[in-house]
Amino acid sequence: MTHEVPPSLPPADAAAPPRGRAPGGSPDAGPAYPAATSAAPASTAPSSTAPAGTAPAGTRPASTASATTAPAAAEEADVIVVGAGPAGSATASYLARAGVDVLLLEKAQFPREKVCGDGLTPRAVKALIGMGVPVREQDGWVRNKGLRIIGGGIRLELPWPELSSFPGYGLVRTRLDFDEILARTAQKAGARLLEGVTVTGPVLDDDGRVTGVTARSTADAGGPERSYRARVIVAADGSSSRLSLAMGLSKRDDRPMGVAVRTYYTSPRHDDDYLESWLDLWDGPRQLPGYGWIFGMGDGTSNVGLGMLNTSDSFGHVDYRDLLRRWLAGLPPEWGYIEENRTLPIRGAALPMGFNRTPHYTRGLLLAGDAGGMVNPFNGEGIPYALESGELAAEFIAQALARPDAAGAERVLMAYPQALKAAYGGYYTLGRRFVQAIGNPKVMQFATRHGMPRPALMRITLKLLANLTEPRGGHATDRVIHALSKMTPAA
Ligand SMILES: Cc1cc2nc3c(=O)[nH]c(=O)nc-3n(C[C@H](O)[C@H](O)[C@H](O)COP(=O)(O)OP(=O)(O)OC[C@H]3O[C@@H](n4cnc5c(N)ncnc54)[C@H](O)[C@@H]3O)c2cc1C
């Protein structure tokens, strides 16, 4: 399922827009934290020192009524994107390509590790290609042909479907360099990336509309804050999205949530050309809760992990690291998934699914990626949805900024949640029902027992779970999946 693309943006190689309105900052400033330490103390900085003319017509500039203390003279941009993960870098990249002055604030310094399975389906590959990221093998990408599913005592290799809308291959890449590649892509397109800058809160006007953010150097937690101002702010700060929280947008309890842990082992299976997914995990004769994966990284290691959904009775009541060790202890020793071969600590993180934070636009703030709970409930994949929602957010923002008045701009921004719903709403509602059903181990056992012996059925299931269908026409199964998604209310 792909979203309808509103008016197209300039191609990736279009001339980069003028950059660097930062006072004294190098336009290409990578790691530099703008001269914040010399700023006047917050209490002495009147809001009137902020540069004028950045607020949309009809809205007031940031005032001292802000939820946070008013910091020194603000750096300004048309748009501020908080977080340079896949969602933030995609948003910033597409905005910059549309000629918008965009400031991308990231608390970490690249390269940085991120807890992930590192698996990219054809849906993610398509989004990367659209963003202008070279995905050739000589650029360090490792390709895979499909998904191997292991469950109910059966092992099934399902190639990615051959479709006009998606490439027939997936990729793996550690997030250590994947996220840096995306951030540099945004920077190359013209976005001003500031690394090592932790956003501490929104700056609000008297109407509660966000007109900027406060931030400080990550390296100096007790250091001074400074403010950044923009007409539109994007929260792309991941699952916990403190910026959304500060704007009153908390997680929805009625939406699915997953937790997953992963680590890496040196292994002879590092060059596996299939992503491998385990539907049932065993500790001797005892079935363990959760689902597992083994992805060969092509660099001598495998990314191995397991996840669990909050519809499972065991959710939150088990030691996930211990679970991983128990599962791996039962796998063939020649695969090498033993303590001595572990190259990184076992680390875990949340998977916010099925739009678990809404609305996706309010009072000057758009949500993209995990901040908006956009992980696919069917398969726990979040990167393509982070990239796609970033692109969509950029399209709406670019259109909004071109409206001559604030009311017109607001109308455009208010339509972003509707566009997200049209793209994923019905599909995610189906996904929520799926997650509810498989939370019952008996349903999962039944599905595994009856599905796995039927490869044709599993090929259709793969299309459904990975959201890989032709948006128009295509095979009858594509049309059925589409009809189901469209008929299901996008709640
Ligand atoms: C164990 C595990 C395995 C997974 N495996 C896969 C997989 O194989 N394939 C897949 O597609 N998805 C997978 N996912 C999901 C995927 O990791 C996420 O959906 C994806 O990272 C979302 O991207 P994002 O840009 O929205 O958020 P993130 O990747 O979380 O990026 C958010 C960024 O914001 C920055 N940030 C946060 N707060 C601030 C702040 N205050 N100021 C400045 N910057 C800030 C962070 O440093 C980070 O760089 C997995 C998730 C987990 C937990």
Image: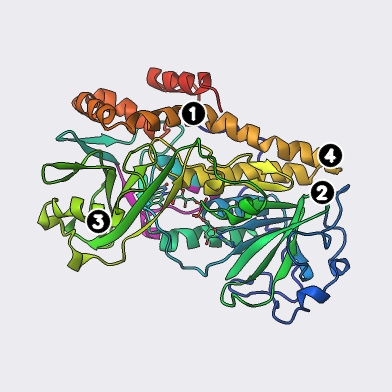
Give yes or no for contact between labels 1 and 4 (Cβ–Cβ under 8 Å): no
In front: label 2 or label 4: 2
Colour scheme in use = rainbow
Query: Hey, what amino acid is under mark 1?
Result: Thr
Residue that carries the numbered disc 4 in the rendered image = 407
Given contact means CB atoms under 8 Å apart, are the residues at marks 3 and 2 in contact?
no
Residue 233: image location, x then y, percent: 69, 53
User: Crowding at label 1, few (<14), some or many (≥20) Cα neighbours within 10 Å?
Assistant: many
Which of the numbered marks, if any, corresponds to residue 370? Answer: none
Name the image quarter holding the C terminus.
top right
First in sequence: mark 1 vs mark 2: 2
Task: Residue 243: name its quadrant.
Answer: bottom right
Q: CA distance from mark 2 to mark 4?
A: 15 Å
Q: Is residue 363 above or below residue 466?
A: below
Residue 194 visible? The answer is no
The residue indicated by pointer 2 is 207
Q: Are marks 2 and 4 in contact (CB under 8 Å)?
A: no
Label 1, on which residue? Answer: 429
Magenta segment boundaries in residue numbering:
128-145
Three-letter amino acid code at the position of disc 3: Asp
Disc 4 to disc 3, how far (Cα)?
A: 54 Å
Q: Dot 1 lies on which element? A: helix
In this view, the residue in front, 88 or 245, is 245
Callout 2: helix, strand or loop?
loop
Residue 423 in sight from this viewpoint:
yes
Of the residues under marks 2 and 4, which one precedes in the sequence? 2
Image check: 491 left or right of 345?
right
Answer whether labels 4 and 3 touch (C-beta < 8 Å). no
Instruction: Find disc 3 in the rendering and name its residue.
Output: 322
